[in-house]
Amino acid sequence: ERRAALAASSGPGVTSDGHRMPLLANVGGPADLPAALEAGAEGVGLFRTEFLFLDDSAKAPSEEKQVEAYRKVLEAFPESRVVVRVLDAGADKPLDFLTPTDEPNPALGVRGLRTLLDHPDVLAGQLRALATAAQGLPVHLEVMAPMVADRQDAKAFADACREAGLVAKFGAMVEIPSAALRARSILQEVEFLSLGTNDLAQYTFAADRQVGALARLQDPWQPALLDLVAAAAEAAQSVGKSCGVCGEAAADPLLACVLTGLGVTSLSMGAASIPYVRTALAKYTLAQCRRAAAAARAADNAADARAAAHQVLSGE
Ligand code: PEP
Ligand code: MG
């Protein structure tokens, strides 16, 4: 079935009426590159750099080791976008030498960018390694911070990037409702947004992403989540900047059409999902995607939102 999907689908992401929607891959390290290339990913939309830090829980990997890994990923996608997320430690991704152990609620504690701002040496080392890795390559490097809450966070990250001498676009992940609600203010400091819908759902519904019993609330079809996606996408559009999605939501072909209709500008997902999303997008016009998005947002729950979008897209 996977082979058939791959065979039936190739080329860039585009709706039936020619609206471009770049389809990018989420990767965890060089080992994920062959699958991303095979699926025809148009770049990397989320490079989770945590993997490098898992070998030694006592300290950060050397800058040399980081440069080697980053360069492999950048070299695999010459002249393409590669969006690297700086270390997202804490909560569901704890690291011994960085993550506080005495927090009552780690998901609401020092994690993501908060950890890096408490350990500026780790952030600076990672940014320097990225600058070195990108040297001489024709890649479009973009670097983003996880768990940005507000403009002050975005500015602190952009300042750190500039201080490290990084020549790249700097961006903020939208994973906290405050960031979606005030996306315009965050965009005063950074050049792009990327919606991390896994954490955005967790924080919107106060539903721990690691608690399976709360799956209903983690469902990315929840209309409240779609409202926040729309808010961020509209803010980015109003200032001519990009706003992608890199959470699991982008991997659901029907939801990918709805996200397109909400105004996001790229979709990043595990490589295995790219052919299915490409095939789904190619069936509908942008106007149909917009109608499906409006129908989903008008629903009262995730199941009804999905059914409403399906009805719009299958009935037309
Ligand atoms: C997300 O939160 O949606 C995301 C893409 O990041 P991660 O799943 O690595 O937290
Ligand atoms: Mg996240």
Image (tube, rainbow, N blue to C red):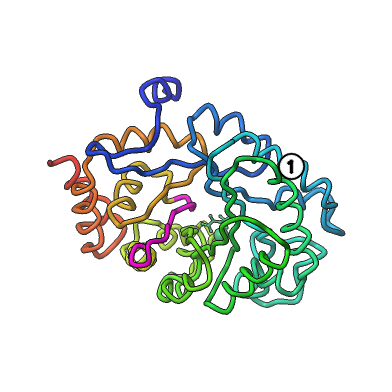
Q: Which image quadrant is residue 218 in?
A: bottom left
Give amino acid for label 1.
Ala
Q: Is residue 249 visible?
A: yes
Residue 66 sits above or below residue 42 on the image:
below
Identify the residue at image location x=55%, y=38%: 79
87 sits to left or right of 280: right
- Above or below, 67 against 117 in this view is above
Question: Residue 210's spot in the image, x, y percent?
Answer: 57, 59
| Tally of numbered tags | 1
Q: In the rendered view, would you say 57 is above or below 43?
A: below
Of the pair 94 and 62, the residue shown nearer to us? 62
Q: Is residue 220 left or right of residue 307?
A: right
Instruction: Find numbered disc 1 in the image and state the secondary structure of the residue it sits on.
Output: helix
- Could you say where residue 121 lies in the image, as x and y percent from the top left? 80, 67
Q: Residue at x 23, y 47 (%)?
A: 286
Give left or right: position of 133 versus 19.
right
- The residue that appears at 52% across and 67% down in the rendered structure is 190
128 and 117: which is toward the camera:
128
- Residue 201 is situated, as x and y percent measured from the top left of the image, at 45, 63
Span shown in magenta? 237-248
Mark 1 lies on residue? 69
